[in-house]
Amino acid sequence: MDKKRKDLYNHRVSISGLNLLARSPRAYKQYIENPRDEESEALRKGSALDCMLTEPDKFDERFAVADITPPGGMMGEFVRVFLSSSTNAINEQDQEAFEEALKTAYNASGFKTKYETVIKKFEAPEVQDYILFVLGSKDKTILSPNEWASALGMKEMLLNNEFTKKYLVDLPALPTIEVHDQLKIEWKHGEFECISILDKVIVDHAKKEIIPIDIKTTSKGVGNFVQSYLRFGYFRQCSFYISAIKYWLHNISEIKNPDEWSIAKFHFIVVDSNLNDFPLIYTVSDQDIEVGRNGGALPNSSMIVTGWANLLDSLTFHQKERDWRYTQEQFEKHGKLELNIFM
């Protein structure tokens, strides 16, 4: 597929974007037009763990472990915005652009104190040392020592656990096993061009079976993963990835006689970022894969969930109408929705 310019009407669709569309059309619009890397401890640790497990040779290219405590709170946000908007000003020693970056950071960070007071805090040695460290690390993701230690601990736990090591250590040694780490699949669904990146895909030539795997971290206890499964739309993600694997099997891979092959249940390998619980493996039922695609309702509940195919229909609606203020249902009901949740 040709690389396309990314705008609301011309872009490859990802599950990250569709999960935002499930939240609101405006969230999706922001994601496409003004993408911003999420900056949270959980995401940094998860990304570091993925890299350690699936692309360890690239870890030093992508991550830097800080020996300086990053500023927190509003100053942390001030520094984040400043760094994201001041690169050219710093490189070109453009004082006017530098001042503009400071004002942008001040407006975005939420400070109520005077601008001059905030700038004095910004100029504190510990803040400036951190900024110099980040600038020296260029485009790398910055990990705190605790985040690095947590990711390393999770890695060791997964590689040594009796249940999870078979997917991460033992299988690649078998001659009939082919392992794809961070498998990037560019595929089509109807008129949409889609993109999926799977943490690990195991191709078992002896069984003619493909096992798709995603590695998840949680701080809520691995036994409570079902809550994250619903909250973050993981049921939708694995269904989207299964369709990507089917496309890959039949249109991209060099596997002969793909109709003779099967795709195993999707595997989530879940590890505790606090290193308290032992890892667990969750497999996804065919029913959940179907609901992840076409939507459905939770048993004994009025809660309706939207599938990724439903969201592609919604995306078609918004692209046709060129309006991203309300969902299709909100438009059709003229902004008036009924509350009827009690059985």
Image (spheres, rainbow, N blue to C red):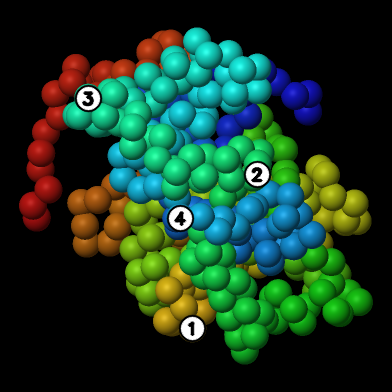
| Foreground label between 3 and 1 | 3
Q: CA distance from mark 3 to mark 1?
A: 49 Å
Question: How far apart are labels 3 and 2 at the CA level?
Answer: 31 Å
| Disc 4: which residue | 69
Residue at mark 1: 278
Q: Position of residue 100 (x, y in %)?
A: 44, 15
Tell me whether circle 1 and circle 2 mark residues in contact (CB < 8 Å): no
Q: In the image, what residue type sits under mark 1?
A: Phe
- Closer to the camera, 197 or 249? 197
Does 299 sit left or right of 229 as displayed?
left
At mark 4, the secondary structure is loop
Quarter of the image for the N terminus: give it: top right
Residue 126 or 184: which is nearer the viewer?
126
Q: For mark 4, does the 10 Å Cα neighbourhood hold few (<14), some (14 to 19), or many (20 or more) residues? A: few
Q: Which structural element holds mark 2?
A: loop
Taking the image as shown, residue 203 lies to the left or right of residue 289, namely right
